[in-house]
């Protein structure tokens, strides 16, 4: 899978989890972009679904607000409403992305 060795789960609680991303040598960073490595938005969706053990059925909203570089530490705060998840992603207490999606 594309996420192999991309992140390390450092903390997982009921409504939040934390990951540390790999360095710039990971293929994800090589593809997006070689001279300015950053996380592609879809990777945050895949990463959250993998850690939560769910399948995304529909993306309701996805906002990507800041550049996420290699070795970043990200917090994913989760609000669940029946089949919908709202995830706020922060780095150094600043919001970098927000994801809303329906799960199966």
Image (cartoon, rainbow, N blue to C red):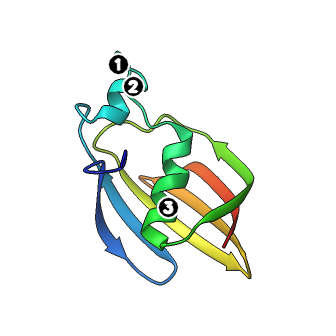
Q: Identify the residue shown where x is 37% and y is 45%.
A: 2
Dot 2: element: helix
Q: Are the residues at dot 1 and dot 3 in contact (C-beta closer than 8 Å)? A: no
Q: Identify the residue shown where x is 68% and y is 48%.
A: 62
Density class for disc 3 (Cα within 10 Å; few <14, some 14-19, many ≥20) is: some
Residue behind mark 3 = 48
Q: How many marks?
A: 3
Q: Identify the residue shown where x is 53% and y is 56%.
A: 89
Rendered image: mark on residue 31: 2
Disc 2 versus disc 1: distance between alpha carbons? 6 Å
> Which sits earlier in the primary sequence, circle 1 or circle 3?
1
Dot 1: element: loop
2 vs 1, front mark = 2
Rendered image: mark on residue 34: 1
> Which sits earlier in the primary sequence, circle 2 or circle 3?
2
Which image quarter holds the C terminus? bottom right
Density class for disc 1 (Cα within 10 Å; few <14, some 14-19, many ≥20) is: few
| Viewer-closest of 18 and 102 | 102
Dot 3: element: helix
**Residue ranking furthest to the top:** 35
The reply to whether residue 91 is in sight is: yes
The reply to whether residue 94 is in sight is: no
Rendered image: mark on residue 79: none
Say left or right for 103 vs 74: right
- In the rendered image, residue 84, in percent from the top left (x then y), is placed at 72, 72
On screen, 78 above or below 93? below
Say left or right for 51 vs 5: right
- In the rendered image, residue 39, in percent from the top left (x then y), is placed at 44, 37
- In the rendered image, residue 92, in percent from the top left (x then y), is placed at 41, 52
Disc 2 versus disc 3: distance between alpha carbons? 20 Å
Q: Are the residues at dot 2 and dot 1 in contact (C-beta closer than 8 Å)? A: yes
């Amino acid at each position: 899978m594309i996420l192999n060795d991309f992140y390390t789960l450092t903390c997982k609680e009921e409504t939040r989890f934390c990951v540390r991303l790999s360095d710039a040598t990971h293929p994800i960073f090589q593809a997006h972009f070689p001279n300015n490595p950053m996380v592609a938005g879809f990777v945050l969706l895949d990463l959250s679904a993998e850690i939560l053990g769910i399948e995304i059925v529909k993306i309701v909203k996805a906002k990507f607000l800041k550049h996420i570089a290699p070795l970043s530490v990200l917090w994913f705060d989760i609000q669940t409403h029946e089949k919908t998840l709202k995830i706020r992603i922060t780095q150094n207490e600043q919001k970098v992305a927000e994801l809303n999606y329906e799960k199966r």
